């Protein structure tokens, strides 16, 4: 991240962003800090693409350095000018190479359901992963992202993922009215607190419980309704534990 750290945001200038080389160099320091705080580092949310094998391998090395078992390795962005089926096939070929690296480093590579990618849904991610070993590759499910693009019925999506479901990102979003253009009401999607968004997290957790999901939930709240970060996180954790029953 080369953004202005004097004006940090969630996606640019973030003061906690690290390169793979940083993670490797500071691995002992990071692991010691985690031990002091009694927290684990199960996953790296890397911003890398499956079509870049050098970046993927660097990220796997960083994951090994801190003992993370999962790492985000996303697919390519959707190109409306290119053939859709070929894009799926190309990404499947890229991910077959990622799978080889995942086996070598013993770190599971996960595709995030993310707007703008060829895989905004679980169904599309499964198309890319079909035939690959779910022990080494999988899906990082993000229902909040799917309010922006690729909404799916929870129970069907979870069952479509099957053994590929690796972890779950927790955030929320809402669709709001904007201006009227050419006599037509326009809408926009924005992030919002967990309790107020269109993702029913109680229902998500119930559906995950029905298939005995026992993986990680990664809190990723991009809302700013509550500007105090500590207060926002405290309320998010209370909601997830007390209302949704996540241990």
Image: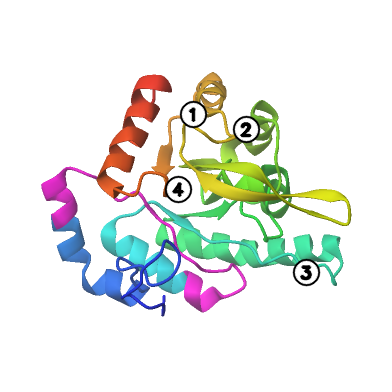
Q: Position of residue 82 (x, y in %)?
A: 84, 71
Distance (Cα) linking label 4 and label 3: 29 Å
Q: Earlier in the sequence, mark 4 or mark 1?
A: 1
Q: Is residue 54 above or below residue 240?
A: below
Q: Which quadrant: the C terminus?
A: top left
The residue at the point 21 percent across, 70 percent down is 26
- Residue 213 is labelled as 1
Asked whether disc 4 touches disc 1, contact meaning CB atoms under 8 Å apart, the reply is no
Crowding around mark 1 (Cα neighbors within 10 Å: few <14, some 14 to 19, many 20+) is some
Which residue bears the numbered disc 2?
158
Residue closer to the observer: 86 or 4:
4
Q: Position of residue 69 (x, y in %)?
A: 38, 51
Q: Position of residue 66 (x, y in %)?
A: 27, 59
Distance (Cα) linking label 2 and label 1: 10 Å
For numbered disc 2, what is the local secondary structure? helix
Asked whether disc 4 touches disc 3, contact meaning CB atoms under 8 Å apart, the reply is no
Q: Does the rendering let one see residue 79?
A: yes
For numbered disc 3, what is the local secondary structure? loop
For numbered disc 1, what is the local secondary structure? loop
- Which image quarter: residue 106? bottom left
Q: Earlier in the sequence, mark 2 or mark 1?
A: 2
| Tag nearer the camera, 2 or 4 | 4
Q: Earlier in the sequence, mark 3 or mark 2?
A: 3
Q: Is residue 76 left or right of residue 17?
A: right
Which residue bears the numbered disc 3?
79
Q: Which quadrant: the N terminus?
A: bottom left
Distance (Cα) linking label 2 and label 4: 25 Å
Asked whether disc 2 touches disc 1, contact meaning CB atoms under 8 Å apart, the reply is yes
Which residue bears the numbered disc 4?
223
User: Magenta residues?
Assistant: 33-56
């Amino acid at each position: 991240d080369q953004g202005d750290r004097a004006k940090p945001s969630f996606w640019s200038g973030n003061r906690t962003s690290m390169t793979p080389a940083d993670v490797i160099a500071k691995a002992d320091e990071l692991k010691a800090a985690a031990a002091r705080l009694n927290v684990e580092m199960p996953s790296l949310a890397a911003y890398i693409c499956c079509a870049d094998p050098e970046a993927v391998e660097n990220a796997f090395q960083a994951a090994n350095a801190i003992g993370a078992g999962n790492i985000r390795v996303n697919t390519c962005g959707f190109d409306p000018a290119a053939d859709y089926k070929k894009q799926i096939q190309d990404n499947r070929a890229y991910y077959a190479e990622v799978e080889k690296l995942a086996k070598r480093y013993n770190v599971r590579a996960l595709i995030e359901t993310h707007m703008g990618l060829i895989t905004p849904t679980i169904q599309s991610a499964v198309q890319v992963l079909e035939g690959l070993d779910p022990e080494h590759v999988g899906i990082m499910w993000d229902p909040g992202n799917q309010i922006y693009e690729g909404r799916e019925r929870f129970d069907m999506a979870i069952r479509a993922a099957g053994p590929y479901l690796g972890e779950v990102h927790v955030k929320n979003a809402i669709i709001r009215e904007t201006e009227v253009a050419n006599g037509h009401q326009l809408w926009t999607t924005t992030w919002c607190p967990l309790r107020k968004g269109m993702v029913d997290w109680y229902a998500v957790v119930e559906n995950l419980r029905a298939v005995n999901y026992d993986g990680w939930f990664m809190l990723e709240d991009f809302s700013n309704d509550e500007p105090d970060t500590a207060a926002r996180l405290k309320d998010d954790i209370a909601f997830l534990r007390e209302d949704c029953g996540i241990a």
